[in-house]
Image: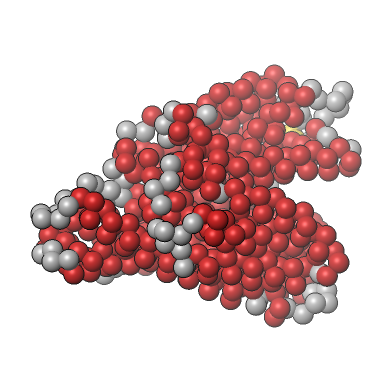
């Protein structure tokens, strides 16, 4: 169901606060938990793969449902959709806060991500409905975007402070009062409106889309744990391939498709989609591994880790608005390419850091990564929107955002598998070179990788911890190299597309774009 514009006086400030809170909470939980990974691992004895799932569960559900989150809200009614999704997000946060095991924590994170996929489009739709004047709409959407950006950029700092003052559970507990207040404001202040029939939700597309993404992520993350040739992992990859093929076939034939494949007839839109995926895979994923570097290699506290994110956060804050000005003057292509190249330089530089690298050097590398992301993202989104017919702008925006989030999911999975494999191999080599029996070394490696306390007969604990730290740092070095290579290769993509307006988009009738 889709609500029509209300009549009457201007909505109270509490209505705006409810809408801003929805976007703020959804974006905050994309980043705030990054600094809690080490305490979670220690408290819940989480394995490396379980840590990846605490991040990927949220991102996967958020990305998988984002394209249909608006349609779900349309059918519920925007006011009802806002209240229901806020309630689900708050309940998921409560589950995370009280989680006695990683499996429960991952389930709570999945609930949060699913709720966030509805919160984001619903809050934006309500802004347009409650503030219909063009200047009002632009101002309120600008404030919504600014607060969401602040939530992502400075979430790690807030998370580090909460972990230091309370515990990692406070990272999720903070959502409870915020969520309840937002629900109260929404119930009291957001007006009801008359509804009309909305487009049907592509349920089959949602199921197939999440299935292929989940089974792919599962296979990559768990492959190092169960063995790449094990029936479980092989079956996961086969399922992912079959689900993806079925998804593309279904979406091609559906009138109201979850993913409008017709948009990809435009070379410019396809290029922007590839870049969005690469941005998620390389630059966005970098913050997950940066958190591991700070806490597992340098031994930073959660608060120190949060502060350590500031150079990148501040660089994004400065570069993002600058990107719009540069794109207006020089065009979107060179700005996007420059941003990716700068980001790749920052990622590659990180390959040379280790346990003894001073923070002043790391900070400059983070400035490059943040600047690259800030410069590349806005003009790339602009390219995608301009490549689509105006009546499909919402679908184009949602598709590109979804691909970036999927890029983050796949990036954490693939790069996490690279890191886990190199970490374990290097630790095994280090222990055996120190005279440790290969069998005892193997048991210690498996214990460390599983988040358990490892002991080696005849090996002092400080020496073992030094070996673990060095091996962990070795694995991260290759993560940065692979991420940098992906960013650098994607920097070439915008240059392959001709600059003039893309005729393929205008040649496709509006009613057939999604067919």
Q: Is residue 412 above or below residue 96?
A: below
Q: Residue at x 55, y 36 (%)?
A: 158
Q: Is residue 290 above or below residue 122?
A: below
Quadrant assignment, res 98: top left
Q: Residue at x 23, y 69 (%)?
A: 429
Considering depth in this image, is 443 or 184 the residue closer to the camera? 443
Considering depth in this image, is 138 or 35 the residue closer to the camera? 35
Residue 278 percent location from the top left of the image: 58, 66
Q: Residue at x 42, y 66 (%)?
A: 477
Residue 295 percent location from the top left of the image: 41, 48
Residue 509 percent location from the top left of the image: 79, 67
Q: Is residue 132 left or right of residue 38?
A: right
Q: Is residue 369 left or right of residue 95?
A: right
Can residue 254 be spotted in the picture?
A: no
How many numbered badges does the structure rendering display? 0
Q: Is residue 365 above or below residue 88?
A: below
Q: Quadrant of the N terminus?
A: top right
Residue 120 percent location from the top left of the image: 65, 42
Can residue 39 be spotted in the picture?
A: yes
Q: Residue at x 62, y 62 (%)?
A: 368
Q: Is residue 409 left or right of residue 19?
A: left
Considering depth in this image, is 479 or 465 the residue closer to the camera? 465
Q: Is residue 162 left or right of residue 314?
A: left
Considering depth in this image, is 230 or 45 the residue closer to the camera? 45
Q: Quadrant of the C terminus?
A: bottom right
Q: Is residue 97 above or below residue 285?
A: above
């Amino acid at each position: 169901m889709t609500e029509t514009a209300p009549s009457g006086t201007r909505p109270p400030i509490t209505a705006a606060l409810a809408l801003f809170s929805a976007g703020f909470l959804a974006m905050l939980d994309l980043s705030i938990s990054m600094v809690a990974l080490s305490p979670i691992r220690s408290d819940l004895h989480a394995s490396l793969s379980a840590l990846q799932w605490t991040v990927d569960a949220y991102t996967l559900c958020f990305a998988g449902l984002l394209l249909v989150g608006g349609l779900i809200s349309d059918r519920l009614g925007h006011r009802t959709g806002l209240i229901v999704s806020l309630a689900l997000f708050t309940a998921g946060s409560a589950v995370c806060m009280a989680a006695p095991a990683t499996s429960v924590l991952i389930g709570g994170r999945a609930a949060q991500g699913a709720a966030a996929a509805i919160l984001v489009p619903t809050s934006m739709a309500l802004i347009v409905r409650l503030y219909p004047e063009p200047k009002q709409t632009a101002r309120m959407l600008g404030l919504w975007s600014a607060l969401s950006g602040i939530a992502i950029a400075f979430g790690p700092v807030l998370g580090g402070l909460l972990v230091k003052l309370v515990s990692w559970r406070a990272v999720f507990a903070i959502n409870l009062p915020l969520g309840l207040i937002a629900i109260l404001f929404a119930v009291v202040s957001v007006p009801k409106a008359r509804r009309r029939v909305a487009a049907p939700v592509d349920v089959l597309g949602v199921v197939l889309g999440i299935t292929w993404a989940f089974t792919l992520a599962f296979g990559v993350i768990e492959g190092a744990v169960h063995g790449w040739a094990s029936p479980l992992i092989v079956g996961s990859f086969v399922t992912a391939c079959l689900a993806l093929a079925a998804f593309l076939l279904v979406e091609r034939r559906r009138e109201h498709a979850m993913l409008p494949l017709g948009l990809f007839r435009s070379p410019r839109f396809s290029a922007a989609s590839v870049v969005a995926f690469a941005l998620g895979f390389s630059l966005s994923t970098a913050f997950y591994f940066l958190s591991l570097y700070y806490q597992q290699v340098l031994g930073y506290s959660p608060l120190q880790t949060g502060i350590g994110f500031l150079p990148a956060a501040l660089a994004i804050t400065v570069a993002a608005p600058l990107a719009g000005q540069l794109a207006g003057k020089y065009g979107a292509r060179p700005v996007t390419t420059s941003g990716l190249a700068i980001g790749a330089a920052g990622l590659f530089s990180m390959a040379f850091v280790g346990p003894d690298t001073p923070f002043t050097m790391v900070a400059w590398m983070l400035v490059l990564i943040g600047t690259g992301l800030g410069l590349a993202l806005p003009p790339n989104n602009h390219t995608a929107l301009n490549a689509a017919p105006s009546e499909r702008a919402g679908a184009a925006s949602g598709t590109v955002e979804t691909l970036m989030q999927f890029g983050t999911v796949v990036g954490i999975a693939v790069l996490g598998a690279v890191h886990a494999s190199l970490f374990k191999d290097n630790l095994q080599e280090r222990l055996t070179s120190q005279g440790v029996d290969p069998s005892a070394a193997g048991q210690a490696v498996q214990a460390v990788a599983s988040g358990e306390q490892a002991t080696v007969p005849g090996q002092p604990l400080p020496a073992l911890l030094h070996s673990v730290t060095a091996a962990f740092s070795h694995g991260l070095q290759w993560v940065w190299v692979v991420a940098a290579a992906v960013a650098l290769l994607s920097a070439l993509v915008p240059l392959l597309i001709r600059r003039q307006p893309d005729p393929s988009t205008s040649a496709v009738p509006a009613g057939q774009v999604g067919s």
